[in-house]
Image (tube, rainbow, N blue to C red):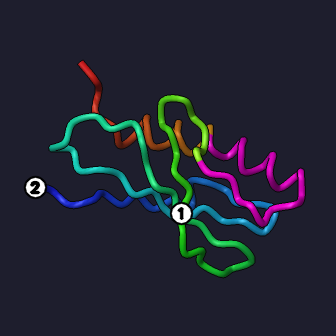
């Protein structure tokens, strides 16, 4: 069995509102297409213990950050889900035939 695939975002996915998206963790290719990724991120330069689960097909995060009260930051996170899903899908997900 292959191991978890790691995709670094540095230079590809921009951060903002004190949040930086660092990398995606994807299931091994030998499991076939699995439309989910775990997105690791940091806030104010501090790595967060838990990642955000991303549905690659729906292009949305399945988790919300409970401690984010700023509506602009929440909107930024939601918009970022679409950009991250597109980036991962275009480059690292095999076609589903």
The x and y percentages for residue 80 are 67, 46
Residue 50 colored in magenta in the image: no
Mark 1–mark 2 Cα distance, whole angstroms, equals 23 Å
The x and y percentages for residue 18 are 78, 69
Does residue 22 appear left or right of residue 70 in this picture? left
Q: Secondary structure at mark 1?
A: loop
Q: Residue at x 28, y 24 (%)?
A: 96
Q: How many marks?
A: 2
Quarter of the image where one finds residue 49:
bottom right
**In what quadrant of the picture does the N terminus appear?**
bottom left
Q: Residue at x 19, y 42 (%)?
A: 31
Which region shows up in magenta? 63-81
The x and y percentages for residue 65 are 71, 59
Does residue 23 appear left or right of residue 92 in this picture? right
Q: Which mark is residue 1?
A: 2
Q: Residue at x 21, y 36 (%)?
A: 32
Q: Secondary structure at mark 2?
A: loop
Q: Which residue is mark 1?
A: 51
Residue 68 colored in magenta in the image: yes
37 lies above or below 51: above
Q: Residue at x 21, y 44 (%)?
A: 29
18 lies above or below 6: below
**In what quadrant of the picture does the C terminus appear?**
top left
The crowding category of the residue bearing disc 1, from other C-alpha atoms within 10 Å (few below 14, some 14 to 19, many at least 20), is some
Does residue 95 appear left or right of residue 19 in this picture? left
Does residue 66 appear left or right of residue 38 in this picture? right
- Asked if disc 1 and disc 2 are in contact, CB closer than 8 Å, the reply is no
The x and y percentages for residue 90 are 43, 35
């Amino acid at each position: 069995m292959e191991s978890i695939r790691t995709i670094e975002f540095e230079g590809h996915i921009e951060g903002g509102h004190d949040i930086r998206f660092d990398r995606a963790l994807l299931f091994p290719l030998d499991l076939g297409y699995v439309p989910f990724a775990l997105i690791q991120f940091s806030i104010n330069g501090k790595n967060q213990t838990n990642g955000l689960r991303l549905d690659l097909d729906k292009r949305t995060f399945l988790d919300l950050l409970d401690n984010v009260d700023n509506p602009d930051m929440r909107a930024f996170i939601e918009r970022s889900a679409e950009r991250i899903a597109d980036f991962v899908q275009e480059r690292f997900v095999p076609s589903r035939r």
